[in-house]
């Protein structure tokens, strides 16, 4: 794990993370297409329903579209974070906590592959934000 006193994951471990992240990006992009399709789809025609039902239906469609838009936005951010993790893999800095310089435990990276902070550093960061 160490190379010339530099703490990092081995090339084999980095390749494992790369495969994991590429799979997560592919799945997230598929999910994004579903949300975008749902967001842009106008849905069923309500021309033949009563005016009251039509208003309720249109309101529901607006809420659904807003929710799909929010979900798509979150997925877009997630994809960008995963892509940034791929860059860190290429730079061989992936898995190094940006606050402590120590390796982020593999278990955390398997759950949150785009993490840049160890769990303790993340908790300390949250405490610091709360104390402001």
Image (cartoon, rainbow, N blue to C red):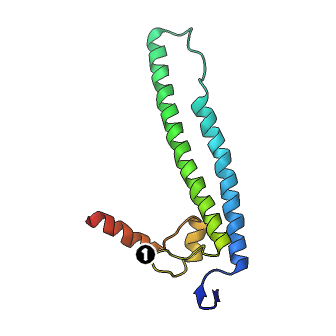
Residue extending farthest to the bottom is 4
Is residue 117 shown above or below 25?
below
- The secondary element bearing badge 1 is classed as helix
Q: Residue 66's spot in the image, x, y percent? A: 48, 34
3 in relation to 18, above or below:
below
Q: Looking at the image, which is closer to me, 55 or 116?
A: 116
Instruction: Name the residue at 57% across, 49% down.
Output: 75
Q: Nearer the viewer, residue 56 or 117?
A: 117
Image coords of residue 70 (percent x, y): 50, 41
Dot 1 crowding, Cα within 10 Å, few <14, some 14–19, many 20+:
few
Q: Quadrant of residue 80?
A: bottom right
Residue 5 horizontal side relative to residue 99, left or right: right
In front of the other: 6 or 45: 6
The residue tagged 1 is: 120
Instruction: Count the numbered circles shown.
Output: 1
Q: Is residue 95 left or right of residue 21?
A: left
Q: Is residue 46 above or below residue 64?
A: above
Which of the image's four quarters has the C terminus? bottom left
- The residue sitting at 61% across, 20% down in the picture is 44
Give the image location of residue 131, x and y in percent.
Answer: 26, 66
Residue, far left: 132
Q: Residue at x 72, y 65 (%)?
A: 19
Q: Position of residue 1 (x, y in %)?
A: 64, 86
Question: Residue at 63% of width from left, 91% of height from top?
Answer: 4
């Amino acid at each position: 794990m160490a190379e010339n006193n530099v703490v990092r994951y081995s090339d084999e471990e980095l390749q494992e993370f790369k495969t994991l992240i590429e799979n997560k990006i592919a799945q997230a992009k598929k999910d994004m297409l579903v949300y975008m399709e749902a967001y842009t789809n106008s849905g069923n025609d309500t021309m033949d329903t009563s005016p009251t039902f039509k208003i309720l239906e249109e309101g529901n469609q607006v809420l659904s579209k807003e929710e799909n838009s929010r979900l798509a936005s979150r997925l877009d951010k997630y994809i960008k974070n995963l892509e940034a993790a791929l860059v860190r893999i290429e730079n061989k800095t992936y898995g190094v906590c940006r606050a402590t310089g120590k390796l982020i435990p593999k278990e955390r990276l398997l759950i949150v592959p785009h993490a840049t902070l160890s769990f303790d550093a993340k908790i300390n960061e949250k405490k610091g934000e709360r104390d402001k």
